[in-house]
Image (cartoon, rainbow, N blue to C red):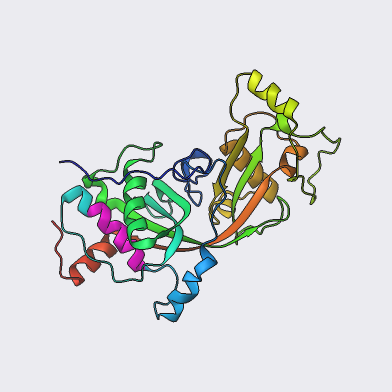
Amino acid sequence: MSLLIPQEREHGLPGADSAKDTAPGGAAAATTTHALDGAEAKDPNADDDAEDEDEDGDGDVCTPQHCFHAFDALYCALTEAEPIEPAFHDHSFPLFVTWNTRASRPGRSNRLRGCIGTFEPLPIRDGLAEYALISAFRDTRFRKIQEAELESLECSVSLLTDFEDASTYLDWEIGTHGINISFPHPSLLASPSASSNPSPLSSSSYLPTSSSVSRLFSGGSKKTSFSACYLPGVIPEQGWTQVEAVDSAIRKAGWSGAISEDLRRSVRLRRYQSRVCAVTWDDYVDWRREMGAEIV
């Protein structure tokens, strides 16, 4: 049986695909997988979608209906069942879809099975269906989700809101904000300072010189900038401080060299918040039957 999988969008974010956001060791880190290098996230609040959704009487920005729609996309792709037309408003949001395998025993944590999203605002009807399949079938950290796994799955949807440019790499709050960072190759930075202590000062106004760029390319490297992100829930789950979270994001972006205070100060950080909802397979089955459709 062939699966209909949408083509991945290339956003030019860290890796130029979609965004994966995970913590070390594969924990769901407020997810993003590819695409965050070298692109800024667009502000989803420009058209006041979240406010409009509340005014339209849909309640919270992110609801179980969004998760059911994502689950329906995966179920129908795996079984060739007919999808159910979504009833929620088709506002645009940056979004992530996360698949978890539910813990088999009490007291154990769910296990990440796939998580990819985008910082580009998308109409959520098509966007959720698209990224439900991308995260299920194209998260390169995992094998593709199979039909036999459906009963063990949980689907989580994150709609991203309140994007703001931070004044420094410390200008955000743990437990409230997710972070999207970008920074230049350290060889492009101005002369280093002697300080190694965390500083509220920003050096994001660095000006690479033509000679530093020439030296970088003459060494065979073509990557002049790096980027990565973490969803709001990942950082408190990992127990990181702000500096530890930024350092982890720097590593996630692909930089393996020394992390100096000058490198941290060169980080351009964009903070954001998310609205999250999750449902289990059993929740989805009940919903699908309530909608008059059967489970194959």
Q: What stretch of residues is rendered in magenta? A: 64-75
- State the image coordinates of residue 75 (x, y, percent, origin top left): 23, 53
285 lies left or right of 245 = left
The secondary structure that most of the magenta stretch takes on is helix
216 lies left or right of 119 = right
Which is more toward the observer, 183 or 158?
A: 183
Going 53% across and 53% down the picture, which residue do you hit?
231
Going 46% across and 51% down the picture, which residue do you hit?
118
Q: In which quarter of the image is the N terminus?
A: top left
- State the image coordinates of residue 180 (x, y, percent, origin top left): 59, 49
104 in relation to 212, above or below: below
Instruction: Pick out the residue farthest to the front.
Output: 210
Going 75% across and 25% down the picture, which residue do you hit?
211
Instruction: Pick out the residue farthest to the right.
Output: 194
Which quadrant of the structure image shows residue 296? bottom left
- State the image coordinates of residue 217 (x, y, percent, origin top left): 64, 23
Which is more toward the observer, 4 or 280?
A: 4
